[in-house]
Image (cartoon, helix red, strand yellow):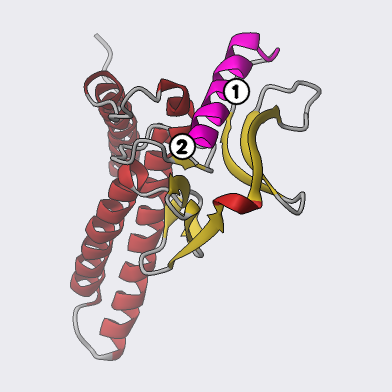
Amino acid sequence: MMRLDLDDNERGAFHYLFAGVVLVLLLKGINFALDLSTRPDIRGLEALEPFRQGYLLNEPDVVVSTSAGRFARIASALVWSVGAALAAGTIAALLARLLRSSARTAGLRAARIALVLCFGWGLYSALFIPVERTHTSTNGLERHRYRWHLADIPMPFTRETETLPGDQVQRIEAVAAPALNGCESTLRLQAVRADGNVLVLGEVDGTCPLALERLRQASDAAALLERAL
């Protein structure tokens, strides 16, 4: 049996590659387990579920504006967390060198802290905190959005709330979004204001061609929100 003769750099590269594959499989496993065992309680409003994009939300009639799925958000959280860890480690190492202390120790410590904090927040946000979400209330349509975000991961302490009174909403409708590649496969849930302007409440991507069943379900979602409003 042949044995590969690898130097330290090559072995290290294979180790990192193997660790990356394991991490991706682990994230996919977490996402699959959530799909199987944890579904949001939407109390009979099943038509709204596609417009919640896998977020684990308590509000029965909330929809989110992002079109990114749960796994894509978890992957984004991992990527920007690693970037933040590298940046924090580099800055800490430079400062430690200027102060004539151990640059390696300071860099590793800062990188680890940044990675844990950023990925913790990113994972929590990917599951529970949409960048923009809308739900009905006694005051009308309430929209909560984060002014600053990386991909679909919101930045803490940047949330703002906007209320659209019910008497300023003409209707809530489901439409096929304008085609970018010759195929209208994206469904959009939107509120038409009294002045004619449109507020996008949520989007769902799908395969081409657009299935009538998906359009019917989206129309049911629009009707449910309109009745709740």
Q: Is residue 124 left or right of residue 158?
A: left
Label 1 sits on what residue type? Answer: Ser
Q: Residue at x 43, y 34 (%)?
A: 52
Horizontally, residue 177 falls left or right of residue 47, namely right
Q: Position of residue 63 (x, y in %)?
A: 46, 39
| Span shown in magenta | 209-228
Q: Quadrant of residue 81?
A: bottom left
Q: Nearer the viewer, residue 3 or 172?
A: 172
| Residue 138 at x, y percent in the picture | 42, 51
Residue positioned most to the front = 167
Name the amino acid, label 2.
Answer: Ala
Mark 2 residue crowding within 10 angstroms, few (<14) / some (14–19) / many (20+): some
Residue displayed at 60% across by 51% down: 167
Callout 2 secondary element: helix
Above or below: residue 27 compared with residue 161: above
**Residue sitting at 44 percent across and 45 percent down?**
135
* Residue 49 quadrant: top left
Can residue 217 be found in the magenta stretch? Answer: yes
On screen, residue 139 above or below 35: below
Return the x and y of residue 104 as percentages of the image width and height.
Answer: 23, 70
Q: Which labelled disc corresponds to residue 219?
A: 1
Q: CA distance from mark 2 to mark 1?
A: 14 Å
Residue beneath disc 2: 228
Q: Main secondary structure of the magenta part?
A: helix
